[in-house]
């Protein structure tokens, strides 16, 4: 598929057609990594660190745990 580079403010932009967005599992606001390899522009979805609850809970100690936080009385149909 061919497309044209367009001006966007002081930068240049390329629109990513919907079929490409869908196949690459992209969405509005998705962070991507840009790189150039042998004159080709490569766009990769940014994959940040993966967190597991078990690993995060291992970092909780008596020194860094905080007390319960009161959010006040229920004002609607809250479960708590």
Image (cartoon, grey):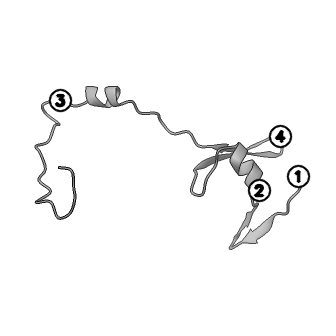
How packed mark 3 is, by other alpha carbons closer than 10 Å (few <14, some 14-19, many 20 or more), is few
Q: CA distance from mark 4 to mark 3?
A: 49 Å
Q: In terms of sequence position, does the residue under pointer 3 or pointer 2 come before the other?
A: 2
Question: What's the mark number on residue 38?
Answer: 4
User: Residue 57 location, x and y as percent?
Assistant: 27, 29
Q: In terms of sequence position, does the residue under pointer 1 or pointer 3 come before the other?
A: 1
Q: CA distance from mark 1 to mark 3?
A: 54 Å
The residue wearing badge 3 is 61
The residue wearing badge 1 is 1
Q: In terms of sequence position, does the residue under pointer 2 or pointer 1 come before the other?
A: 1
Question: Which quadrant holds residue 47?
Answer: top right
In the image shown, does 23 or 6 lie closer to the viewer?
A: 23
Q: Secondary structure at mark 4?
A: loop
Q: CA distance from mark 3 to mark 2?
A: 48 Å
Question: What's the mark number on residue 17?
Answer: 2
Q: CA distance from mark 4 to mark 1?
A: 20 Å
């Amino acid at each position: 598929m061919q497309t044209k580079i367009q001006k966007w403010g002081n930068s240049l932009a390329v629109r990513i057609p919907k079929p490409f967005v869908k196949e690459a599992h992209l969405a509005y606001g998705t962070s991507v990594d840009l790189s150039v390899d042998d004159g080709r522009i490569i766009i990769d979805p940014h994959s940040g660190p993966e967190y597991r609850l078990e690993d995060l809970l291992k970092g909780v100690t008596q020194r860094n745990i905080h007390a319960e936080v009161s959010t006040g009385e229920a004002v609607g149909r809250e479960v708590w």
